[in-house]
Image: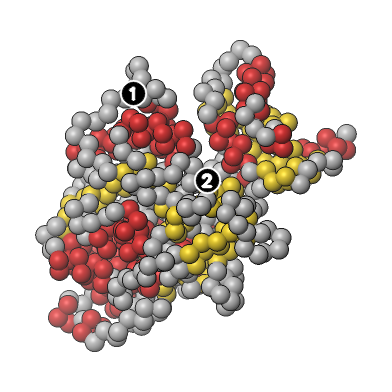
Amino acid sequence: MPRFTYPELPLDALLRRAAVRDPAGCAVRTAADEVSFAELDDRADRYAAYLRHRIGRRGARVGVANVLDADFAAAYYGTVRSGNTVVLINPLIKEAGLVHVCATAEVEVALVPRETAELLVKAREQLPSLAEIVVTDAPDGVVPADTLPLAVALAQAPTAAHDPGRAGAEPADLDADACIQFTTGTTGLPRGVRLSQRNLVANAAQTARAHGLGSDSVTLNHLPLYHVMHLNSAVFAGARQVLCTDPAPQAALALAARTGATHFYGLPARLHRLAGAVGAGGQGAGGPARPAGLQLRAVLSGGTALAPAVARTLRDWLGVPVVQGYGMAELSPLAHSQDPASPVSGSVGTPVPGTECRIVDLVSRGPVDVYGTGEVQVRGPQLMSGYLGDASRAGVDADGWFSTGDVGYVNQDGALFLVDRIGDVFKYDNELVSPTAVERILAEDPRVADCIVVGWPDPVHGALVWAGIVLRDPTTPEPADVLEAIVTRANERLAPFEQIRRVEIVDSVPRTPVGKPERRALRRTVHAKAAAEAAA
């Protein structure tokens, strides 16, 4: 493998470097304004000065809500610049999840929007470390009791000329925690992942190279939240970022055309809706027109699997590759990416530069051959420092290999194909069944709006395939007949051990904010039904 190098710089120096190289260049564009690299860097300085003044030491943890706004970028880099650690707060989570994140990370200052601030005020007795709550979206200055508007907080900070912390700043420790990102919690309580400055700078360089980002790139983020992967890689490359808060995919494409976007970052759920509107035959009768003036080089999807049929539909309609990647919080987050020049259908691509991947047997834990199925292990400079409260660096062996918990295989070219999560796969007669693989076949039926698969316990075979299906037309007069036809069609394309043997109509599929199916609670329900049926 060619040696991969990345700058030996603190994370916030990526923004400083971009501001020096292209001070007037647009760093972030929102519906409200455009912020240049120099302006963003200055805003980061103001946040840093406030935090140095308010906290008075290095190493504290600052909660920052990753709203899709340029001020998140300023607060993120400013916190790191102040010598403290960013704790990413999802502004969509409810009170229990918010308390878990802030209490586990011992957040001392929170920079959050009004709704999140209200929840924090309500839960303050459970958060003894929390000293100050700053409301970031209060232009009128009206905020909940016991909180501060952002403008008031920043005004407390000394100016650059009178900021002793800035003048005598200590050299940054590149292996110190820069950011704590919590896992999605689909298999248990969310865990705080400790990411160092080195981890994040390395992954910024890896992502920029894998996605082909440069100073002439324009990245459009069609996401519900600001993701640090997109932020760091764009700033590393000196690329312009466009933030789209409109959830409609067609509106995002229209914005991409108006802003000259070269890279379109979207969630699988939104891309799936767009492909459904386009139709399998391209634009199709009554389908949306492709916006004029598009300059896209690639559409990039992540967070969960994108069905190959959806990728093909959008590729044919837009005339650009639709690229998938693979990663997780523990990997800062990107580990694999398809090559935009030649994506391999169904895979998540090859390891990003400087990253190694291998597959190990689920039982013996020894490496398996090409096309052999087992657990995916990864190592590289983007691998986390560890989890909060866990000195053992769980999941990482003595040779630096991280066990991801995902099942997959690699082909002869090193492209990774994911099968499922270890906790989601189940066995029928000693054959491994991937719920995702069965869902992919079901989802190609035009009568299926959404679906989810788990194992139904069976004393003879181990587990049977149970499918919950959301009908595209819930008012159909003969739903049982439609369900039978859907299952028959799918089973014709599935291996004997993958056959759907239990099926129900469901109103909706429980999913995480990034579109991953939440199987844990559903498994409990299905297992309870199986137990009741067996006892009857």
From the image, which quarter does the N terminus lie in? Answer: bottom left
Query: Mark 1 highlights which residue?
Result: 283
SS class of the residue under badge 1?
Answer: loop
Quarter of the figure with residue 136: bottom left
Task: Find residue 306 and report its horizontal and vertical position in percent.
Answer: 47, 41
The residue furthest front is 412
What whole-number distance in Å separates the C-alpha atoms at marks 2 and 1? 28 Å
Query: Mark 2 highlights which residue?
Result: 516
Of 206 and 277, the residue lying toward us:
206
Task: Find residue 27 and report its horizontal and vertical position in percent.
Answer: 20, 57
Task: Find residue 410 and report its horizontal and vertical position in percent.
Answer: 54, 53
Residue 53 in view here: yes
- Mark 2: give few (<14), some (14-19) or many (20+) Cα within 10 Å: some
Pointers 2 and 1 in contact (CB under 8 A)? no
> Is residue 343 positioned above or below 117 on the image?
above
The residue sitting at 32% across, 61% down in the picture is: 232
> Is residue 532 positioned above or below 364 on the image?
above
The residue sitting at 36% across, 38% down in the picture is: 247
The residue furthest top is 477
The residue sitting at 22% across, 36% down in the picture is: 294
Quarter of the figure with residue 155: bottom left
The residue furthest left is 24
- Left or right: where 426 falls relative to 443: right
Task: Find residue 390 and report its horizontal and vertical position in percent.
Answer: 58, 74
